[in-house]
Image (spheres, rainbow, N blue to C red):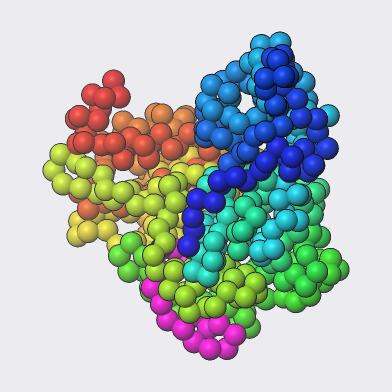
Amino acid sequence: MVKDMMENLWSAYEAAAATGGALCARGGDPKSWTAEEWNAGGVSIDTRSLKPGDIFVALRDARDGHEFLKNAFEAGASAALVSRAPEDAPEGAPLLVVGDTLEGLRDLAEAARTRNFGKRVAVTGSAGKTSTKEILRAVLGSAGEVHAADKSFNNHWGVPLTLARLPMRADYGVFEIGMNHAGEITPLTKLVRPHAAIVTTVAAAHLEFFKSVEEIAEAKAEIFSGLAPGGVAVLPFDNDYFPLLKKRAEEAGAASFVSFGEKHGADFQLLDYRAKGAGAELTVKIKGKPRAFFAGVPGRHQATNMLAALAAADAVGVPLDPAIKALGAITPAEGRGARAPIALDDGAAVLIDESYNANPASMAAAIGLLGASHPEPGGRRVAVLGEMLELGPEGPQLHANLSEALVAAKVDRVYAAGQLMRHLWDAIPAAMRGLYADDAVGLVGPVLDAVAPGDIVMVKGSNASKVSAVARALKQSGGKEEQKESLA
């Protein structure tokens, strides 16, 4: 039931009322043109992805969005939310002028929330936010129309942008909320006012900005401060910080709590996980009752993400039977476990693309996914790993600690890139070493040379490690010789 719901999202008068802005135009003859008469089908902050009919919001970030007004109107913008009218703005272009465009976007978001009578679910966590958001899109979609961002719009502008795009008639809204500093989640969750708030997990991530993992748990717990009256906190039962999270949710006024995980006592408990093709067979216990079903996305970590999504869906009134059925049709998102064939001169291998960002928790989960995968006869488990960033002084040891997960997963070869990955390289058994390189680009050719028919190759690393270049090269492979020529 997920549909395109962007038609007539905002009229000029609605947007002006929401923001307190002034409707006007730069230049032109006011007798022959009325600035107020426009309607917008969406909201955009990027002229490269702007759709005809969108309001363009001229944010000040790495670049000043006011510099791109001409591009926005050439792309078909219906109006622009601005704090000034640059001299090169198109004459007669409809403008909505506010004091600050980010605040204007937040005002649009708040108005979109108050005029919508659907249920909202917010997700945060040290890993699994985007995957859980996409799982929620599927399970909530079994019961109504769902609004969620197509990308990981989880920061100070991404959350209000997603909320400002919320259609009035949407039954459900899903909002991913991220952070790398304390205090960042609070204003975003108070803007969203979720009816259910999920913390997927708490683990070492962004330690460069925190003194301890407990501080990270405190920052994640901020999501409960925005719960709507009657709101439900969805908590990771297996996590060491479950008691802290529950306490903070209780202090924030959560009406009830629901837990998920593998340990006995979780309300939504994973009893058994078995990899099956590109997915998995799951046996779970939901509020004391056993259920078995097929999930279209593999990985034990994804299984617990699914339980979190089911718990939140149940909390906002979605029937569980169609929600569980929807899990069989989902597929991994690009860079988050999606599988692709690797064409070789003498056969084929399989790529598991986990290249969208990494921290110790998500890295261990991806290694576990590789370990649960079964190569063809004669094939190997191959891990291509880029370094994990923003880990502070503990970074070297956190990289070295991954050696235990690699051994447990029976990985045959490791290809590692980046200065921090040198610590893992030194820690793994010599027989496991494929190649170490200073950067990910240095791995592309050697990995293409090394991959053999029947292998399963998993690629994972922080975005800044650029290990995704290896994943792209493997996907584009038309055989080793042809691929090497294309890279030359």
**Residue range corresponding to the magenta coloring:** 284-302
Closer to the camera in the image, 39 or 204: 39
Residue 388 in the figure: left or right of residue 229: left
Compared to 169, does 312 lie above or below? below
Closer to the camera in the image, 450 or 20: 20
Residue 160, magenta (yes or no): no
Task: State the quadrant of the C terminus.
Answer: top left
Residue 372 in the figure: left or right of residue 486: right
Closer to the camera in the image, 104 or 238: 104
Q: Residue furthest toward the front?
A: 31
**Residue 480 pos. (x, y %):** 21, 34
**Residue 9 pos. (x, y %):** 62, 46
Which residue: 61% across, 38% down? Answer: 40
Q: Residue furthest toward the left?
A: 346
Q: Residue furthest toward the bottom?
A: 289
Which residue: 31% across, 31% down? Answer: 445
Which residue: 25% across, 36% down? Answer: 477
Q: Image quadrant of residue 325?
A: bottom left
Closer to the camera in the image, 266 or 431: 266
Which residue: 71% across, 10% down? Answer: 87
Residue 286 in the figure: left or right of residue 455: right
Q: Is residue 388 visible?
A: no
Q: Is residue 444 visible?
A: yes
**Residue 348 pos. (x, y %):** 20, 48
Residue 296, magenta (yes or no): yes
Q: Image quadrant of residue 256?
A: bottom right
